[in-house]
Amino acid sequence: MDTQLAQNTAARKERLIALRRRKEAQEKGESVEAHFAFKQRNFDPETRQARKATGPEGHDTVEKEVEGLAEEIVREDEERRAEELDLFNIQPRRPNWDLKRDMSTRMGKLERKTNEAIATILRQRLREQRGGAASEQVDLVAGIREAEAERDRDVESDGSE
């Protein structure tokens, strides 16, 4: 284990020295030798070794991840439809359900106008009753005046005889 640690340390020192030399060469404007860089897909940074290529069976693909997903969704959908289709919950619609739906907006306007018309009729009747009572009072006063006039006529006719 100590030997492996020493080897890793030595390899790291060599890499750092090479990196420092390249950096100095770039600063001086000297040509930099081509350096091969490992890409992470084929390189294991822990072991500093190239990975061995694995076949397609080693790679996880989207097809493998969603392999049983379609069947599961279809099965869940069938179960949900079976629960929704309960024969006891099915009720026929009334024959005029669509007429009620279409007429509800029109009837709302008519109900408002009907209520206004009823209120107008009630106001007119109240006015007539109040006016009728006032006219009865006027009639009473007129009747009293007529009665006084008749009495005066009677008195004159009685006194003249």
Image: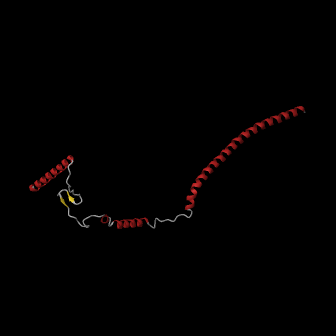
**Res. 71 image quadrant:** bottom left
Q: Is residue 78 left or right of residue 16?
A: right
Q: Quadrant of the C terminus?
A: top right
Q: Is residue 89 left or right of residue 37?
A: right
Report x, y in % for residue 40. Answer: 23, 57
Say which residue appears at 79% left-offset and 35% top-offset.
Answer: 145
Coloration of the structure image: secondary structure
Q: Compare residues 52 and 124 and report the one nearer the observer.
A: 52
**Residue furthest right in the image:** 161
101 over 57 or under it: above or below? above
**Residue furthest top in the image:** 159
**Residue furthest left in the image:** 3
Say which residue appears at 57% left-offset and 60% top-offset.
Answer: 99
Report x, y in % for residue 53. Answer: 22, 64
Say which residue appears at 14% left-offset and 52% top-offset.
Answer: 14
Callout count = 0
Report x, y in % for residue 8. Answer: 13, 54
Say which residue appears at 63% left-offset and 47% top-offset.
Answer: 119
Q: Quadrant of the N terminus?
A: bottom left
Report x, y in % for residue 132. Answer: 72, 42
Q: Compare residues 117 and 128 and report the one nearer the observer.
A: 117
Q: Is residue 65 left or right of residue 133?
A: left
Q: Is residue 37 left or right of residue 75?
A: left
